[in-house]
């Protein structure tokens, strides 16, 4: 805990955010446990896509940041002042945000939200004025799982009307996939434990298959889809589960995410 940190000033294109809530992202935990490479210890490769290590100390952690805009830099409308928002925590290397899988983020390569104030790019602080979500709830939702899910759906070129199977559906990325499928007009089918059925149906799953009983799995899926094929599989489990779906999904339509790695088959 430090009290000698000066309040940052927003540069051109930035907003100054008074932080009201910051969640603990999995990446925050990993940094605390020493699982990321640093300039002093490069033998850990839990998180380093390329280039030199970017985790340096001292570092203010916190990736999933919620707060309110209290000042703006040049080129940013004063109308942003007072707006509540959620930070897109990626540190982008260029302007192609929609296709840029960045290797760094706030709280790791730059100071994050475990502070009273943070200055961030205005176009990465997204206004969320939903009064039904408290600041802490919004921070806990974060953006990591939804961005991962969106990249997976984009990799499989999912379209409205398509049937999508989601494994490991009750986790953060899985629940994001189900909701995004519905927003896109796709039909999500969930594979999870039986006790998660009600929750997954409420989120938008068309049906839930019990992962504890994989006997006759293909027949069960065909019965649910009225003998229509699954157009794409979003596999969050990996291992033997992935092998099962390689021959089941349509060509190029198995998107798998395992141990923070994404691959399209």
Image: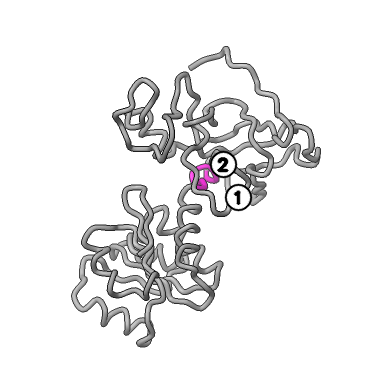
Going 28% across and 65% down the picture, which residue do you hit?
Answer: 194
The front one of 189 and 152 is 152
Under circle 2, the secondary element is: loop
Going 60% across and 51% down the picture, which residue do you hit?
Answer: 132
The front one of 4 and 42 is 42
Q: Residue 174's spot in the image, x, y percent?
A: 40, 59
Q: Residue 134's spot in the image, x, y percent?
A: 58, 44
Under circle 1, the secondary element is: loop
Name the residue beneath numbered marker 1.
96
User: In the current view of this chain or complex, which residue is farthest to the front?
Assistant: 51
Going 37% across and 33% down the picture, which residue do you hit?
Answer: 29
Residue 131 in magenta stretch: no
Q: Is any atom of residue 141 visible in this view?
A: no
Name the residue beneath numbered marker 2.
92
Going 44% across and 36% down the picture, which residue do you hit?
Answer: 24
Q: Give the quadrant of residue 68.
A: top right
């Amino acid at each position: 805990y430090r009290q000698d940190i000066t309040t940052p000033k927003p540069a051109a294109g930035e907003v100054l955010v008074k932080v009201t809530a910051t969640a603990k992202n999995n990446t925050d935990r990993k940094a605390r446990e020493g699982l990321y490479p640093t300039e002093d210890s490069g033998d850990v490769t839990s998180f380093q896509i390329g280039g030199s290590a970017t985790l340096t100390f001292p570092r203010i952690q916190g990736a999933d940041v919620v707060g309110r805009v209290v000042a703006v830099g040049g080129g940013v409308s004063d109308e942003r002042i007072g707006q509540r928002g959620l930070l897109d925590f990626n540190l982008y290397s260029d302007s192609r945000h929609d296709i840029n899988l960045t290797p760094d983020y706030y709280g790791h390569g730059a100071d994050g939200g475990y502070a009273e104030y943070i200055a961030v790019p205005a176009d990465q602080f997204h206004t969320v004025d939903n009064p039904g979500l408290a600041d802490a709830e919004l921070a806990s939702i974060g953006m990591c799982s939804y961005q991962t899910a969106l990249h997976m759906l984009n990799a499989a070129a999912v379209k409205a009307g398509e049937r999508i199977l989601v494994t490991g559906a009750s986790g953060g990325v899985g629940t994001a996939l189900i909701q995004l499928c519905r927003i896109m007009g796709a039909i999500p089918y969930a594979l999870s434990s039986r006790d998660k059925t009600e929750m997954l149906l409420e989120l938008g799953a068309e049906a839930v298959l019990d992962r504890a009983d994989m006997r006759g799995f293909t027949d069960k899926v065909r019965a649910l889809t009225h003998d229509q094929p699954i157009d794409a599989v979003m596999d969050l489990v990996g291992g033997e589960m992935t092998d099962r779906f390689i021959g089941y999904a349509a060509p190029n339509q198995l998107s798998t995410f395992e141990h923070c790695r994404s691959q399209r088959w």
